[in-house]
Amino acid sequence: MNSSYLHLGFPFPVKGKAQVDEIRVCTNRSCRRQGSMQTFQTLTALAPPDVSVKSCGCLGRCGAGPNIALLPLAQIVGHCGTTAAAADLLLGLCYEGSGVKSKTSLDALALRMRAEALIDEAHFSEAERLLAQAIDLKPFGGIHILYKLRSVARLRIHDYSGALEDATQSLTLAPNYAEAYIRQGDAFLAMDQYDAAKKSYSTCLQIDPSIGRSKSFKTRITELEEKLATINSQQGSNSET
């Protein structure tokens, strides 16, 4: 890669989200020791939906790591080894003029991580409360993920209309977010809107066909097909009488 090198502490010359399509984070041994996994996780959580974040091998300049490559600019940013540095990088790259401080977005991310743990522990009401707090902070990144997660929590506390509203809001922010289509389909399924659920699940597969191989997705499709079969059977019986 023919690249120019930037130290994160210098005045950052790259402006405008349209200039960056992909961010690659070196997770090779030297950069990993300097905190690149933390950087990778923060960038993944806060990047705009249309900017992909990927791990990669050595980018050189190991003593100045963790190193990050910005594409298609072919620029490498060094010394980005903390959550604050990663958030500042995204703020300069993608969210200039948003008026939101990087600390606010990191606070929202911390709330999100706590909420994810609570969802795993089946504490859905508490998770919903924390996600509402995170959304109210109006972070500059990852808002579509917050809405998707709150849709999960709301579905589990039987707030089906709220779950649908959040999944739809997530898709408004990130139209190609496959996981949000799953949550939208789940809400439709819970509300007995089977044709709408089928459409959401189908759209999800169009975006990411690999999801169709997951056990949880297959379970959803089986449940949907069983409900549709029951309705068709009932309609057939009614027509015969």
Image (cartoon, rainbow, N blue to C red):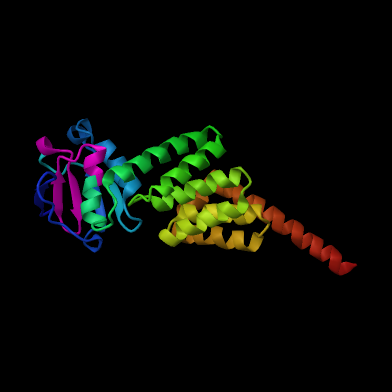
Q: Position of residue 59 (x, y in %)?
A: 15, 44
Query: For residue 55, what is the image quadrant?
Result: top left
In the rendered image, is residue 56 in sight? Answer: no
Quadrant the C terminus occupies: bottom right
Residue sitting at 51 percent across and 55 percent down?
167
Q: Is residue 62 left or right of residue 26?
A: left
Foreground residue among 220 and 64: 64
Q: Is residue 3 left or right of residue 227?
A: left
Foreground residue among 100 and 168: 100
Residue 39, placed above or below residue 223: above
Query: For residue 207, what is the image quadrant?
Result: bottom left
Q: Position of residue 91 (x, y in %)?
A: 24, 51
Q: Position of residue 209 (x, y in %)?
A: 47, 56
Farthest bottom residue in view: 239
Farthest right residue in view: 241
Q: How many numbered tags mark residues here?
A: 0
Residue sitting at 27 percent across and 54 percent down?
99
Q: Is residue 71 magenta?
A: yes
In the rendered image, is residue 207 in sight? Answer: yes
Q: Is residue 114 left or right of residue 194?
A: left
Residue sitting at 19 percent across and 41 percent down?
80
Q: Is residue 191 magenta?
A: no
What stretch of residues is rendered in magenta? 62-87
